[in-house]
Image: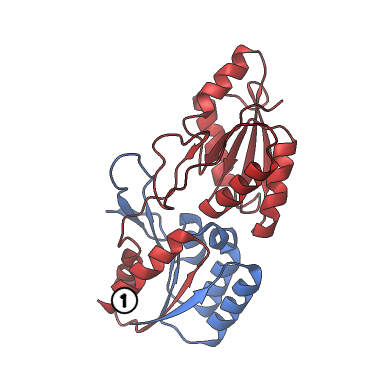
Chain colours: A blue, B red
Amino acid sequence: MTLQSLEVGTTESLDRALRVMAQEYSDGLIVVTDPFLSAHRTRIVESTNRQKVPAVLDSKSSSRAAGSYRMAPAFPRCTGAPLPTWTNSQGREGG
Amino acid sequence: MMQRRAFLSGGLALLAAPLAAEAQQAGKAVKIGVLLPQSASLSVPMVTALRDGLKQLGYIEGQSIVIEYRFADGKFDRLPGLTAELIGAQVQILVVGGTTPAQVAKKVHRQSRSCSQESATRSRRAGRVFCTPAENATGFSTAHEDGFAGKWVELLREVVPRATRVIVIHNPTNPSNIRYWRDIKIAARG
């Protein structure tokens, strides 16, 4: 598997990343959990939908909007590690 | 006058109740500042959860608590100004969503404070749960174990078994994203 890294931390870099997504072929997309990316998830989801690329997104609302897949931790706990929870676009969860 | 301001990152936690109790004993509503990185519309789930959680603890907005909201609309350069606005509004508790916004808000808070109390959270590695308040800052952050982000690759492989070219969008200014990106690269080699 070859990874293409798109570093996004500003609106300008987000614009560039979305242009790259539109221009370059990919079999899939992973959007890492980050407050900036979450804040701009609407644009990312719209782009994902246009490209019809399977995507792993960071939040349930994003994945539902995109019909994509999401994996996020359960609510963090003060003791022990959080249990990973898988949620698909229908909101079904599994371990 | 704001003599003590609790600083909560990620959600309400330990310092909220004592402060609110003090204020309630004095017959005053506690003023809470909420700073979220997204737009107001995207923040609805968080705001709703916050209100519900406070309500379950007996804190009713408009009665025992007053909440001032600020939304950065995804424009992180607005975070310092929005934090300053909330501090200027004399909030007693700051609730900040997200590691990066919390770091920005803490910096502004530290710089703006003319009174004596040390407020900053001790330096902690991003991505850890705050089990105990550090000075007057506490909260939680996403506590992913090393290797967690590799699960995203596994999930994508389940959906697209023949995937050979994958785009990864990440934010290098977020310390947790550096770990995620490392995990993803390791998983992609597997």
Depth check: B175 or B185 in front?
B175
Q: Quadrant of the N terminus of chain B?
A: top right
Left or right of A51 in this view: A71: left
Q: Is residue A2 left or right of residue B49?
A: left
Res A84 visible: yes
Q: Position of residue A23 (x, y in %)?
A: 55, 87
Classify residue B181 by image quadrant. bottom left
- At label 1, counting other C-alpha atoms closer than 10 Å, the crowd grade (few under 14, some 14-19, many 20 or more) is some
Asked where in the image residue A29 lies, by quadrant, the reply is: bottom left
Identify the residue at horizontal 64%, vertical 27% (top origin). Answer: B61
Task: Please give the residue where the numbered disc 1 appears in the rendered image.
Answer: B188
* Residue ID at (52%, 79%): A51
Q: Is residue B173 above or below residue B52?
A: below
Residue A82 spot, x, y in % from top left? 32, 48
Q: Is residue A42 left or right of residue B183?
A: right
Q: Is residue B8 above or below residue B142?
A: above
The residue that appears at 35% across and 54% down in the rendered structure is: B144
In screen coordinates, is B163 left or right of B91? left
Q: Amino acid at mark 1?
A: Ala
* Rendering coords of residue B118 (x, y %): 57, 35
Q: Is residue A39 above or below residue B27?
A: below
Residue projecting furthest to the bottom: A24
Going by the picture, which residue comes out furthest to the left?
B190
Which of the two residues, B139 or B163, is positioned nearer the viewer here? B139
Q: Chain of mark 1?
A: B
x then y, percent, for residue A2: 37, 83
When asked about the image quadrant of residue A11, the answer is bottom right
